[in-house]
Image: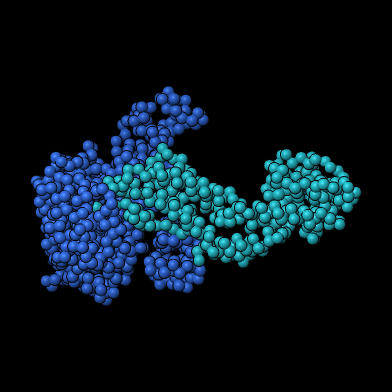
Chain colours: A blue, B cyan
Amino acid sequence: MMTGFDFDVIVIGGGHAGCEAASAAARAGAETLLLTHRADTIGTMSCNPAIGGLGKGHLVREIDALDGLMGRIADKAGIQFRLLNRKKGPAVRGPRTQADRALYKRQMRMAIEEVERLHVVEGDAFDLLMNGSIVSGVETADGRRYAARSVVITTGTFLRGLIHIGNEKTPAGRVGEAPSVGLSERFERMGMRLGRLKTGTPARLDGKSIAWNRIGVQEADSMPVPFSFMTDDITNPQIVCGVTRTTEETHRIIRDNIHRSAMYSGDIKGIGPRYCPSIEDKIVRFGDRDGHQIFLEPEGLDDDTVYPNGISTSLPADIQEAFIRSIPGLEDVRIKVPGYAIEYDFVDPTQLDHRLAVRHVDGLFLAGQINGTTGYEEAGAQGLVAGLNAARHSLGADPVKFSRTDSYIGVMIDDLITFGVSEPYRMFTSRAEYRLSLRADNADQRLTPLAISLGICSEERRERYSRYESAVHDGRTELQVRSLTPNEAEAFGLSLNKDGVRRSAYELLSRNEFEFSDAEGIWPELANIDSRVKEALKIEAGYAVYMDRQAATIADIRRDEARVIPADFSFDIISGLSNELLSKLNRFRPLTIAQASAIEGMTPAALALILVHLRKSSPDMSVAKRQVQ
Amino acid sequence: MDLVEAEGLAELVQAETAAQRRLAKYLADGHLSRRYDAWMKRLSQARALIEAELDFTDEGDIPGSVSDQVWQDMQLLADEMAAALDDHTAEIVREGFRVAIAGPPNAGKSSLMNFLAKRDVAIVTDIAGTTRDVLSVDLDLDGNRIVLFDTAGLRETEDPVERIGIERARQTINAADLVLHLVDLGEPTSLDLHDTSKLDSDMIVVRTKRDRHHPAEAAGGLSVSTVTGEGVDSLLKQISQRASVAVQGGQLVTPLLIRHRNHISAACDWLRAAGAAEDHALELRAEMLRSAADDLAHLTGRVTPDALLGLIFSQFCVGK
């Protein structure tokens, strides 16, 4: 490819979205340029030093299943692995680890350098090169021009970034790094809708000045569960975190000075989330609580810096010090860097399609916080999708769409491009309608076959996965061919309905209280199955009945996803739609019936009306017929 | 206007009796929609609490277990849905108060039917067992819709066709809101209605062929003549009173369209299943609540995951 171009794909930004985008594009066969302000900031964790969590852990597992970077790097940099919701069912378990910030960055940099066809260049991307509405490359602030058929922009909070500490305002993308101004203006000239969001971060503390002996601790799991399918063991030493709480005095100091917080003084125009990331929000909205929990998370094995998770703030530095010192264990704490709020431009993501490409600009892809999301995991997952599709756009291959029915990645992208964002978008398991099917434990089975067929999967993973897949298949067969009667079961201390029906080992495993070890007690030869496979089969068997139930709904959604609503389709001509629904349809402009059906307040009758009109207005009846079947 | 209100309007167009018009107006004014919305709101609140427990366990600020109150309220909600499905008031108003004319062969059932219908709807002969199918006519009594069913005479028979007719008669009697038990004044045989589920309170004994007998024989109790019309007004008055009592005291705000009943019944089943699944993992029970909400959403419109998150964020301090 690349005739007349310097690169197939240019990725602007070296954060979590940028790294995944560049890696995915290069793995998909594109000569890729990663353009970043400073190469030494690649892989920087600008907020909390942790990867994963509930919902977010699912995203990391999916990135990994598609042979992305985040899971492998987190495994190499993780210093406190915990599987959240361990006591609940597998569908809502979320792997999480705290990461050594320096180690993460170093490992990410190394991983990026190892990728074939990927070139890292420093530069401030100032403007897009355009050929009408077709992207043709990027121009840097110092006048260098790079030509490419696809450009992925992952500039995070850098678009007109403005940092607030009390009433001090500093234009910046991150502390000490200049914001990006040119691209916002380019977006405005293109007629794209921009919005403004805010996010925040807490002060960084000097760990040597914390009275660790006077606060609670949170331990890592004794058996760390890695993110990546490719990781066998976690080798980093595991640390403990401190746990403390705000006090009445903390609340009083914050309340007395609330007018000095950038978020409450009226200085910040950007919209914050409905959840409470800042301590000001927590006190204003839930001040009657006796205290709010704070986790003191060491930022690294050889780093004294501590990240106090739970007290992000935009109060002036002196007030920050005062309220932090009112917290048990932090009475004599030294603040290394004060916390701050940052406001930044984002692009209304309803202007994107499922590839994360801008609908009316050919070759322009956006990923990460620029689309109104928050979190490394959300950014990384978008980067992978945008980078992959940018490469396929440049190389003339079909787009790759992720669906709500196959992945959290699909849920997130569909949410973003259907509804847009009214606050920084964060992943939760409750966003996934097919939560029981979309589990962290089966991410590989769901997505690695796709990665293999797209050619973005390494040979090593492909081999390992195919071994695993056949082991699961063989294990399943072993379980299905072994069976016993209720009377035989009784001999093993197992009480079943005396209905004379033989039950297979697989069926027995679907019972809550029946563990794999119980199966081995009956059929000792099953002990030979690999432990990872055993676990997968136990979970699979337990959910089997629910999977069957969801399969029908999933088939419905897939059919609706294939029913395309043309971009120029007029909802106004449909009589019988309520004004409320009509205005929502016009605002969200759904691209498919599946997207339309996800709109709040949507009814089957209204969908039927839309389908009828789609059939009427389609010039090609055969297409329409297929759509309404 | 939402779909449920529009359905009410469609009812209004078809309304024939005063009570039907009142009912349809009730629906079109949104009373039923509001009831469904209130159910959905309760269900959403329960789901929000469960989802909070699933999605924010690492936050420390979500109370350890909110489930108990949830499951209790969901069972109450299921009870309320079941009660609404069992309350047939709206159905009686819409479909009519069902009156079955029953009795032994040749008691004058079809004659009474024809007289009340003021036209010949049933074939009347003197040969026992003439009426084999169930015939019905609609009456409007004081604004209430009454559906009158003529049935085959109940007796032992070898005729296979008549036996089918008798079986259908029994079904009609069982489904009726009121049974007119016809007895020939001259042949006071007692009719065996014990193999039907009817109580005496669901029944009016009507003695027939009053014109063929001495007035003294007809004294005490209700007797009618379809030749002279004597006693018929008194009978109609009793039927009308029974119908009025049947629709009073009951609730009009009950699901009466099959579409509504199916979804509510399914939602109710999901709630019961979720309540019973105590030994299941929480996300499985959450899935059952989601299924209940999906069914109810056919009547109220969809509640998005984001709306549930809004409920969580308004009640709990979460987010780091």
Can I make out residue A419 in this image?
A: yes
For the residue pair A422 and A194, the one nearer the viewer reads as A422
Q: Is residue A259 above or below residue B178?
A: below
- Residue at far top of view: A491
Tally the marks: 0
Residue ID at (32%, 61%): A416
Residue A417 location in percent, x, y?
Answer: 34, 63
From what the image shows, is residue A513 above or below residue A545? above
Residue displayed at 32% across by 43% down = B64
| Residue at x 21%, y 48% (from the top left corner) | A247
In the depicted view, which residue is nearer to us: B16 or A570?
A: B16
A276, A327: nearer the viewer: A327
For residue A407, side relative to residue B210 (left or right): left
Corner quadrant of residue B279: top left
Residue plotted at (32% across, 51% down):
B316
Q: Is residue A61 visible?
A: no
Residue A91 location in percent, x, y? 35, 45
Residue A346, image quadrant: bottom left
Residue B167 position, x and y percent, is: 73, 44
* Relative height, residue A529 to residue B186 (above, below): above
The answer to whether A145 appears left or right of A401 in the picture is left
Say which quadrant the N terminus of chain A sits in.
Answer: bottom left
Instruction: Tell me where residue A67 appears, x and y as whole percent.
Output: 25, 51
